[in-house]
């Protein structure tokens, strides 16, 4: 287990490593191949996951079969934390965008630990609050932002997780298909491709398959507002 990555997760950040050792010892490793599903919406859920390496996407499927991609997460991020407070059906489907290593923690193990470290619950509540804030921001974007603005914001957000600095900008290996990128911003693939083509023509980005190089961060940030 890469303890440094796990300790960077919101649940553990800022804690004394000695206090978290029982939790680390209780966690087990899960490995997924690209495209493999970890759990699906509606399945029973009673555990939290921390990403050690790779990328995980979280999404939902509507009654008419359409998919909505809500988030793409990377190393040091966690998901499934709602099930720790309220074990029940999963509200999202989680699957691997790339080969991934995860560390899972059961509801029973966390509750047992919190009973002896009650003050630590504030860190988990803080993580839940940040997740709720992000959800609210995404809803506001869908209402108030046009598609190019949402595409610019999504690229900047992905760069904070997966960006690799270059002399000319930041390379973001997002590993998403065109359809998945469109789902992430809540638009059609054609509309998203048109926005990316416009950004490329303006010299703001360069497309490289399932990666993109951000060449003009200032223009993208202004477009994302």
Image (cartoon, helix red, strand yellow):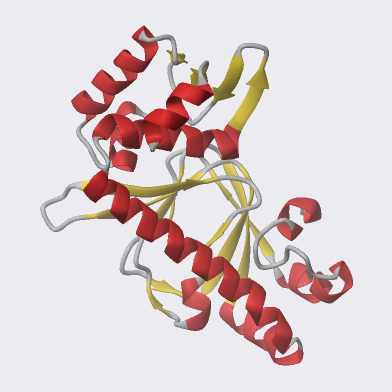
Q: Does residue 152 lie above or below 17 as drawn?
A: above
Q: Residue at x 37, y 10 (%)?
A: 202
The answer to whether residue 165 is seen in the rendering is yes
Residue 78 coordinates in the image, percent (x, y): 57, 59
- Residue 106 lies, with reference to residue 166, above or below; the image says below
Left or right of residue 1: residue 187: left
Residue that extends furthest to the left in the rendered view of this protein: 64
Q: Is residue 181 visible?
A: no
Q: Position of residue 70 (x, y in %)?
A: 36, 50
Q: Quadrant of the C terminus?
A: top left
Q: Quadrant of residue 99?
A: top right
Depth check: 12 or 154 in front? 154
Against 85, residue 93 (above or below) is above
Please, is residue 188 above or below residue 143 in the view?
above
> Residue 176's x, y, as percent?
41, 32
Residue that extends furthest to the bottom in the rendered view of this protein: 115
Q: Is residue 92 left or right of residue 87?
A: left
Residue name at image x 49 percent, y 39 percent: 157
- Figure label count: 0
Q: Is residue 121 shown left or right of residue 44?
A: right
Q: Position of residue 56 (x, y in %)?
A: 49, 47
Q: Which quarter of the image is occupied by the N terminus?
A: bottom right
Which residue sits at x=66%, y=51%?
Answer: 76
Residue in view at x 44 percent, y 57 percent: 134
- In the image: residue 152, left or right of residue 118: left
């Amino acid at each position: 287990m890469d303890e440094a990555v796990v300790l960077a997760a919101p649940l553990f950040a800022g804690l004394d490593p000695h206090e978290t050792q029982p939790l680390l010892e209780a966690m087990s490793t899960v490995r997924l191949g690209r495209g493999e599903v970890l759990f699906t919406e509606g399945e029973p859920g009673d555990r939290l996951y921390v990403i050690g390496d790779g990328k995980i996407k979280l999404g939902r499927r509507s009654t008419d079969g359409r998919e909505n991609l809500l988030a793409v997460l990377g190393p040091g991020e966690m998901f499934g934390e709602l099930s720790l407070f309220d074990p029940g059906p999963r509200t999202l489907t989680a699957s691997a965008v790339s080969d991934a290593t995860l560390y899972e923690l059961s509801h029973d193990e966390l509750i047992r630990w919190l009973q002896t470290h009650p003050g630590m619950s504030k860190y988990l509540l803080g993580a839940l609050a940040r997740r709720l804030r992000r959800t609210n921001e995404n809803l506001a974007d869908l209402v108030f932002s046009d598609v190019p603005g949402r595409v610019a914001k999504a690229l900047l957000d992905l760069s904070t997780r997966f960006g690799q600095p270059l002399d000319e900008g930041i390379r973001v290996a997002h590993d998403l298909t065109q359809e998945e990128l469109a789902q992430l911003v809540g638009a059609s693939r054609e509309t998203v491709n048109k926005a990316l083509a416009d950004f490329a023509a303006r010299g703001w980005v360069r497309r490289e398959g399932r990666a993109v190089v951000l060449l003009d961060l200032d223009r993208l940030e202004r477009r994302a507002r």
